[in-house]
Structure formats: structure tokens, C-alpha cells
Image (cartoon, helix red, strand yellow):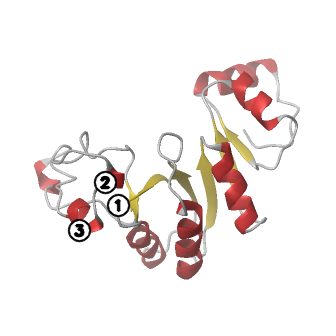
């Protein structure tokens, strides 16, 4: 499972893909400028199907608790959406929530923001982190030979090309 997280204006970690609520709810505005109460008042399901009109934006804690309750045993990839809006303390809040839940499944923290991944490693050097990127050259330059990440999340076209051309010579999962 892959999910994206942002912080509400009152510092709650919420699960939503976009920086704004415009596309997936009946509201407007930046997630970071709305309180959790305001976010919870939005209809986050009707855009998909009227059957889901009571669905709201979940907190990360709600999702983590549900996965434990349901006996999830796969891999959870939590993407910290800090590439457009830098959220102070997001890494620590996400890590704390995961630790409080003590899931029996594996967690990977991913981000387009290199500094966010460094922060996740500083919090706990055993954290599994994955760098997301759109252009391979930029990511290779940014890493500059320092492979502290466990995986690269690459564009599908690049992954297909690597399968055709051969495996990359990197100590990473791609």
C-alpha cells in the first residue's frame, strides 16, 4: 500500500495526495491552511461515487490503526509530501505515529525531498527510505555516490529501459 501524507494547519498528519483539497473533496484550499476539524468536515468520497459521500480525509493514525485491526501484513509506503510545501516536524510526527502503532508490517518512507529522507535516517538509521524522482540524472547527481536510501522510486519508462538494458549497478532496489 502506498499513501501520501501532509500536515494540517494544527499539525495533524493527514492522508491525502494533493497539497490542496480542491480535486478530491467538496472544499477548496491548501491542506496546510485547514485545521483537522475543517478537513474532517469535507466530503472526500462523492467525487468517486455517491456511495462514498460520508468518507472524510483520514489521519495517518486512523489508517495505521485500521491496517493493524485488519491484519495487514504487506509493505506500507508512506510518502512524505514535502517537495512543494516543507512541513516542519513532519518526519518526527510520522515516525512517532508509526512507533505508537507498532505495526507488524514493513514500512518504507519515501519522498521527492532529499532532506526529508536524511531527516528520517537521523531519527532512526534503521528507517527504510526511498527517493522518488522524475529525472534519473538529477537523482544520481543529488545522491553523488551516497547511497543511504534503500530504494529509488523511478518513472516506469526508466524502469522498463533498465530491464531491457540490464540491471543497474547500484546497491539499491529499483
Residue drawn where x is 43% and y is 72% of the image: 61
**From where the camera sits, is residue 85 visible?**
yes
**From where the camera sits, is residue 128 visible?**
no
Q: Helix or strand or loop: what does disc 3 sit on?
A: helix
Crowding at label 2, few (<14), some or many (≥20) Cα neighbours within 10 Å? Answer: some
Query: Which residue matches tag 2?
Result: 33
Closer to the chain start, of discs 2 and 1, is 1
Q: Is residue 29 above or below residue 54?
A: above
3D distance between C-alphas at marks 1 and 3: 10 Å
3D distance between C-alphas at marks 2 and 1: 5 Å
The quarter of the displayed image where residue 91 is located: bottom right
The x, y position of residue 116, in whole percent, is 63, 52
Query: Which residue matches tag 3?
Result: 37
Task: Please state which of the two labelled residues, at mark 1 or mark 3, is closer to the viewer.
Answer: 1
The x, y position of residue 74, in whole percent, is 58, 62
Which of the labelled discs sits on residue 89, or is there none? none
Q: Do the residues labelled 2 and 1 touch (CB within 8 Å)?
A: yes
Q: Helix or strand or loop: what does disc 2 sit on?
A: helix
Task: Please state which of the two labelled residues, at mark 3 or mark 2, is closer to the viewer.
Answer: 2
Crowding at label 3, few (<14), some or many (≥20) Cα neighbours within 10 Å? Answer: few
Quadrant containing the C terminus in the rendered view: top right
Closer to the chain start, of discs 1 and 3, is 1
The x, y position of residue 157, in whole percent, is 61, 21
3D distance between C-alphas at marks 3 and 2: 12 Å
Query: Which residue matches tag 1?
Result: 9
Q: In this view, does 154 lie above or below 58?
A: above
Amino acid at each position: 500500500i502506498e499513501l501520501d501524507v501532509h500536515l494540517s494547519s494544527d499539525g495533524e498528519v493527514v492522508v491525502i495526495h494533493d497539497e490542496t483539497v480542491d480535486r478530491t473533496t467538496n472544499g477548496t484550499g491548501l491542506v496546510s491552511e485547514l485545521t483537522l476539524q475543517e478537513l474532517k468536515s469535507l466530503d472526500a468520497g462523492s467525487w468517486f461515487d455517491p456511495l462514498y459521500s460520508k468518507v472524510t480525509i483520514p489521519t495517518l493514525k486512523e489508517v495505521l490503526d485500521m491496517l493493524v485491526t485488519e491484519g495487514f501484513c504487506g509493505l506500507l509506503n508512506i510518502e512524505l509530501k514535502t517537495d512543494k510545501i516543507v512541513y516542519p516536524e513532519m518526519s518526527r510526527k510520522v515516525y512517532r505515529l508509526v512507533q505508537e502503532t507498532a505495526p507488524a508490517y514493513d514500512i518504507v518512507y519515501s519522498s521527492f525531498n532529499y532532506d526529508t529522507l536524511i531527516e528520517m535516517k537521523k531519527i532512526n538509521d534503521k528507517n527504510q527510505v526511498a527517493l522518488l524522482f522524475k529525472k534519473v540524472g538529477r537523482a544520481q547527481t543529488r545522491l553523488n555516490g551516497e547511497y543511504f536510501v534503500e530504494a529509488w522510486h523511478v518513472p516506469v519508462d526508466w524502469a522498463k529501459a533498465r530491464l531491457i538494458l540490464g540491471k543497474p549497478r547500484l546497491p539499491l532496489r529499483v
